[in-house]
Image (spheres, coloured by chain):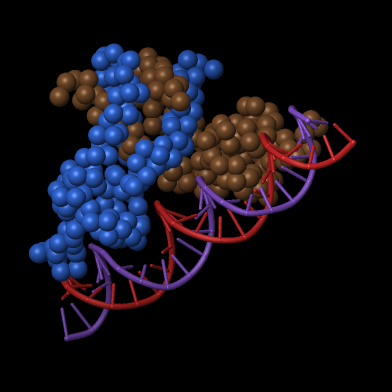
Chain colours: A blue, B brown, C purple, D red
Amino acid sequence: MTDRDESLEIIQRELTAFARRARAAAARMHPQLSLVSYALLAHLEDSDGCRPSDLAEQFLLNKSTISRQVATLEDLGLVERRPDPRDQRAHILHLTAHGRGALEQVSDHRRTAFQERLGDWDADDLARFAGYLRRYNARP
Amino acid sequence: MTDRDESLEIIQRELTAFARRARAAAARMHPQLSLVSYALLAHLEDSDGCRPSDLAEQFLLNKSTISRQVATLEDLGLVERRPDPRDQRAHILHLTAHGRGALEQVSDHRRTAFQERLGDWDADDLARFAGYLRRYNARP
DNA sequence: GAATCAAGTTGTACTCTACAACCAGATGGG
DNA sequence: CCCATCTGGTTGTAGAGTACAACTTGATTC
């Protein structure tokens, strides 16, 4: 096996292990907000207002799934929907103040966890790791 | 925001994005074998025989979850359980020939997918990326 | 204006998972 | 040796997340 193959093998295994643990880890970290809810809120914050169908496309989830996720976020008071002036069928989703606060809180928590986990890495390694991950995810 | 914080931010975001997509991607890649089933089979292959409770500990899953997962793998004929000579309550799980074949097939598929995705990376980058992932996952 | 398309919702069903209750075999102190 | 306790595993139940299909309603197009 070449060095290259060996690296590929390790990358595959480690990413698999990571994916397997991620959901449970996220749930443990903040039981009130699942990984998906968190990602949805974060996307709403970044995009400041988008439609459910945009979320479905962005996250590769069925529109029915998004519909229900959004409904529960709305029930929790984290998101509100406003009519889309251009299309009476559609809504535009916005974070509420409460939603922004919850996102902030969870983000802080996550940031702390990552800082802790990566505390002993030096800045160059962090930068390279970040670059690799970004490059890895960049393709569809 | 320091460079260091920025890298942490990127790492967090990219890992989150990856985790979110992983399950669906794995399901698309091989609909017959979930990420967890795959991981269980792979662990059985590596360890050549282990008990359900070992799997539960290894994968941080509840023993009831393991029990059901193993039951379906057994129904699929991928795994067989043999009595543990040291403890009449316990079983030892082994891959069947069929299970070994299925694992092989999925592994090939995954390997190909990774090779394709990482085909244009040079060997040094792959090695460094692999090293970073391993280091990241290494702590509990 | 009728046919078609797109945005969302709802009914249904399946998988994964956890927790609690339980059973059966193992272990250890009197 | 015997009962109490511990451990490995299974089963009942419940909840989250997801998909697919059918449907409603408004938009688009010919």
Q: Nearer the viewer, residue A84 or A111?
A: A111
Say if D26 sits above or below A78 in the image: below
Residue B20 x/y as whole percent: 37, 42
Task: Examine the rendering and report whether any part of residue B21 can be seen.
Answer: no
| Residue A71 located left or right of residue B82 | left
Say if B71 sits above or below A74 in the image: above
Residue A32 x/y as whole percent: 34, 47
Q: What residue lies at 60% left-to-right and 46% top-to-bottom?
A: B64
| Residue A24 located left or right of residue A80 | right
Q: Which quadrant, please, contains the N terminus of chain B?
A: top left
Say if B15 sits above or below A50 in the image: above
Asked which quadrant contains residue B25, the reply is top left
Residue D16 x/y as whole percent: 40, 53
Residue A12 x/y as whole percent: 46, 29
Task: Examine the rendering and report whether any part of residue A41 can be seen.
Answer: yes
Asked which quadrant contains residue B57, the reply is top right
Q: Nearer the viewer, residue A32 or A114?
A: A32
- How many marks on residues? 0
| Residue A7 located left or right of residue B38 | left
- Extreme residue toward the left, this view: A85
Q: What residue lies at 15% left-to-right and 62% top-to-bottom?
A: A82
Asked which quadrant contains residue A133, the reply is top left
Q: What residue lies at 21% left-to-right and 49% top-to-bottom?
A: A99
